[in-house]
Amino acid sequence: MSEKLPPQSSLQNLRVQKWVAMLSVVLLGVKFFAYYVTNSVAILTDALESIVNVSAGFIGLYSLYISAKPADKDHPYGHGKAEFISAAIEGTLILTAGSLTIYKAIKTLLYPEPLSSIDTGIWLVAITAVANYLIGLTCVRIGNRNQSMALVASGRHLQTDTISTIGIIAGLILLFFTKWMWVDSAVALLFGGIIIFTGYKIVLNSIAGIMDKADLTLLERMVSLLNKNRHINWVDLHNLRVIKYGAILHLDCHLTLPWYLNVHEAHQEIDQLATLVRSEFGESLELFVHSDGCLPFSCQICEKTDCAARVHPFAKKVEWTLDNILSDQKHQLT
């Protein structure tokens, strides 16, 4: 088997994740310094979550390095599944960070500790919040565009970190003016629950990817695209399936064409289908189309007017839907 070059989207994902990993180390240092000068348990829990950010960043970096490798003899469909495993690990780490946050918050709520230099801590943590949000936003945008679950997971994680940091800042500001010591722990407790919920969703989505669960949102987009740009020779389309391998989509389907088209003409129709799908979903797509020749019952749903082989008059157009296009049976009127 000849070795294919990895798609440009996979290489871009890898570059972005490298920056995420490096910046997460810097932000981790800032948060621990803020804890050192304040002794705030809320800031400590934020720093503990940042340890997860660093670990997840490097795990995501490694998974994107693996998934960017081209298909080979041992992995004919590529290495994209590594991203789902990475996302599952990252989600588990987020769950762990959320649990530690709640534990520390409850402990400090019961046994308060003295705080200091709260105003300095607020400014330091605010800087990390802005940086995390901007990095996370970039990761999610590029990850969604390139169909990269690992990059999206990293971005969501950073955005969640931003939300918890904002809550911590709000609590520290309230604490600064009111001197209510319990606020520090109460805010950390609240956002610890948010962190756990985010980790749960990431784990759930990664398991769905590993198990090749159908992405209904993606399929609905594809069905809408095919209906709007349906060619006259595309008599029927069924048994449509899409599998994600990291940034690469593998699509296969059965396309019914007029039976009298020669091999070259049928291939041209398949090329047009591939071009259409790639125009919407990008170049990182592998298309496997099984072409079927039309049968007499197909005439009733075929809109081709200049067909010398027609044996039945056209009766009704079958609109492709999520239900009937996934079926393994050719469409026909009952």
Image (cartoon, rainbow, N blue to C red):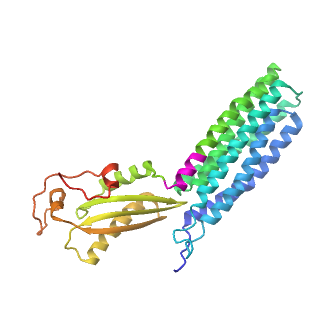
Residue 218 in the image, given as x and y percentages of width and height: 44, 51
Q: Nearer the viewer, residue 191 or 229?
A: 191
Residue 268 in the image, given as x and y percentages of width and height: 30, 72
Residue 134 visible, this angle: no
> Is residue 304 shown in magenta?
no
Question: Left or right: where does residue 271 sit relative to residue 30?
Answer: left
Question: Left or right: where does residue 166 sit relative to residue 249?
Answer: right
Return the residue found at the far bottom: 2
Q: Nearer the viewer, residue 235 or 161?
A: 235
- Quadrant hosting residue 21: bottom right
Whether 101 is drawn above or below 3: the answer is above
Secondary structure mostly seen in magenta is helix
> Is residue 208 shown in magenta?
yes
- Quadrant hosting residue 167: top right
Q: Nearer the viewer, residue 133 or 161?
A: 161
Residue 177 in the image, given as x and y percentages of width and height: 80, 21
Residue at 55 percent of width and 66 percent of height:
8
Instruction: Please state the extent of the stretch shown in magenta in the rendering.
Output: 203-212
- Quadrant hosting residue 64: bottom right
Count the numbered circles shown.
0
Residue at 76 percent of width and 38 percent of height:
100
Residue at 20 percent of width and 52 percent of height:
317
Question: Left or right: where does residue 76 sit relative to residue 137?
Answer: left
Residue at 79 percent of width and 34 percent of height:
104
Whether 171 is drawn above or below 299: the answer is above
Residue 211 in the image, given as x and y percentages of width and height: 52, 55
